[in-house]
């Protein structure tokens, strides 16, 4: 089978790393190429890479010569041309985020079609959500994240696809029925561990007896870092010994707001923002960490690579007991019940700090779980199965899309009776096994 996997082959792209890892494994059984928008610095990979400048009809025509096109869709502007090609060439969608509102918004901005974005949101979710979405575009912060959760805009990404791959059962439930193909849950792979180098400069003066709490990933409002600071400030023992390190890209105004919050809670000098760091420095931070935290709310990703990275480092990780985090076995993470107040988080932190043996045991089980289930080979196996099901779905999807276009040209796309007759006809032509 000739397979084209479309993904940003970009050093900074977590999606690119995942897809390149899966492609290398999948290439052992199929003829696989990576297709990437023209971006640098490019990720090194053992799989051949075809770079394209933009999503033109000629590129779509060439893509159609492959047995299967696999489109990696993540919630960033890096995926604009991949999304355009996915709408032109039916293929298998690998959905890395359960909300792609940032991607779809970037697409409309680039095309100068923001009024159409408002109409799209209203069509899928109603006028109230469209109002919230429009207001949040300028407000940003938590308001924008809440709007993205209410208007994920995945529907048009999946319509006409041959199937969908997601990375959690929770995500599978959310997208079920949005594609005529099957939904496959594939275990998100974790890259091989690297040797620790040196701690970032912001941790150079960390006291030897400090309790180091680490949170990892892009610094957004859903990371709940202010609540973590409150949890530390509200407990006398934590307030005396704990330091919070935030690893990941951040805007200057976000860093300023977090430091101001730490100062208000009398935690000056206890908050450390590293920015983006390399893998060796990250390994050093996790090696020094006592506890990690992944307390996202709302959850917009289909699975958290940063969570799995912290677990593989054999560290106990605090998570909120919802979304895909709730699927993890209770023995491999520490689940904080909703709503995840500072009091609840503080109690969970104290439990780990007071019982180092229990914390180490949770970390050891976390590492064992990730290394057993989240391997590149397991990911490739799931992708291969999804590819076979996608090829089997091609006849029904092609027929359905063709008939839908005919209904649209005839002005009958909104006629429920005609849509029902077409749907029944497709089911008779292609009965479910």
Image (cartoon, helix red, strand yellow):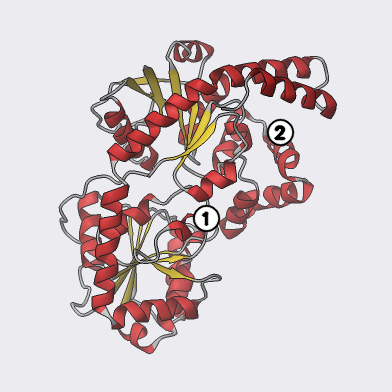
Determine which quarter of the picture holds residue 46: top left
The percent position of residue 152, horizontal first and vertical second, equals 61, 45
| Horizontal relation, residue 261 to residue 357: left or right | right
Please count the marks in the image.
2
Image depth: mark 2 or mark 1 in front:
1
Mark 2 residue crowding within 10 angstroms, few (<14) / some (14–19) / many (20+): few
Q: Is residue 389 visible?
A: yes
Secondary-structure class at tag 1: loop
Residue nearest the viewer, comparing 244 with 21: 21
Q: Give the residue at mark 2.
A: 116
Farthest bottom residue in view: 236
Residue 83 vertical placement versus 349 (above, below): above
Residue 412: percent from the left, percent from the top?
Answer: 83, 21
Q: Name the residue rendered at 55%, 58% in the picture.
A: 298
Q: Earlier in the sequence, mark 2 or mark 1?
A: 2
Identity of the residue drawn at 26% across and 58% down: 367
Horizontally, is 281 left or right of 107 in the view?
A: left
- For residue 351, side relative to residue 132 (left or right): left
Q: Is residue 241 above or below residue 43?
A: below
Q: Residue at x 48, y 21 (%)?
A: 391
* Residue 98 visible in the current orientation: no
Q: Residues within 10 Å of mark 1 (few under 14, many from 20)?
A: many
Q: Are marks 2 and 1 in contact (CB under 8 Å)?
A: no
Q: Which SS class for mark 2? A: helix
Residue 5 vertical placement versus 260 (above, below): above
Task: Name the foreground residue: 102 vs 66.
Answer: 66
Quadrant in which the C terminus is drawn: top right
How far apart are the alpha carbons under marks 2 and 1?
A: 26 Å
Going 21% across and 67% down the picture, which residue do you hit? 288
Residue 139 lies in what quarter of the image? bottom right
Q: Position of residue 358 (x, y in %)?
A: 28, 75
Residue corresponding to mark 1: 299
């Amino acid at each position: 089978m000739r397979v084209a996997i479309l993904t940003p082959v970009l050093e900074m792209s977590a999606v690119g790393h995942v897809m390149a890892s899966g492609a290398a494994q999948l290439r052992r059984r199929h003829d696989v190429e990576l297709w990437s928008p023209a971006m640098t610095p490019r990720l090194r990979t053992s799989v051949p890479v075809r770079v394209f400048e933009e999503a033109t009809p000629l590129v779509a025509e060439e893509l159609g010569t492959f047995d299967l096109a696999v489109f990696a869709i993540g919630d960033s502007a890096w995926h604009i041309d991949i999304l355009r090609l996915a709408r032109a060439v039916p293929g298998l969608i690998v959905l890395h985020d359960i909300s792609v509102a940032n991607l779809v918004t970037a697409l409309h901005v680039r095309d100068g079609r923001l009024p159409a974005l408002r109409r799209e949101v209203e069509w899928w979710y109603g006028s109230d959500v469209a109002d919230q979405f429009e207001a949040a575009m300028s407000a940003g912060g938590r308001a924008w994240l809440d709007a993205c959760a209410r208007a994920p805009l995945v529907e048009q990404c999946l319509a006409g696809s041959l199937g969908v791959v997601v990375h959690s059962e929770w995500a599978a439930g959310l997208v079920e029925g949005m594609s005529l193909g099957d939904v496959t849950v594939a275990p998100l792979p974790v890259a091989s561990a690297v040797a620790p180098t040196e701690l970032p400069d912001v941790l150079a003066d960390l006291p030897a007896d400090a309790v180091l709490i680490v949170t990892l990933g892009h610094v957004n409002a859903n990371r709940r870092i202010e609540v973590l600071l409150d949890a530390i400030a509200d407990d006398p023992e934590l307030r005396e010994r704990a330091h919070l390190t935030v690893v990941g890209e951040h805007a200057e105004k976000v860093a300023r707001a977090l430091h101001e919050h730490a100062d208000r809670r009398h935690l000056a000098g206890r908050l450390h923002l590293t920015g983006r760091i390399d893998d060796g420095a990250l390994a050093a931070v996790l090696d020094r960490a006592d506890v990690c935290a992944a307390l996202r709310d709302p959850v917009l990703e289909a699975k958290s690579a940063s969570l799995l990275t912290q677990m593989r480092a054999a560290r106990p990780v605090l998570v909120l007991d919802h979304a895909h985090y709730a699927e993890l076995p209770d023995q491999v993470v520490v689940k904080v019940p909703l709503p995840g107040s500072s009091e609840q988080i503080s109690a969970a932190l104290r439990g780990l700090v007071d019982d180092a043996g229990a914390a180490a045991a949770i970390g050891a089980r976390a590492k064992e779980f990730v290394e057993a289930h989240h391997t590149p080979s397991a990911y490739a196996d799931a992708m291969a199965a999804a590819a076979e099901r996608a090829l089997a779905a091609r006849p029904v999807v092609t027929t359905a899309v063709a008939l839908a276009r005919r209904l649209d040209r005839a002005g009958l796309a909104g006629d429920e009776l005609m849509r029902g007759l077409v749907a029944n006809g497709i089911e008779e032509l292609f009965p479910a096994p």
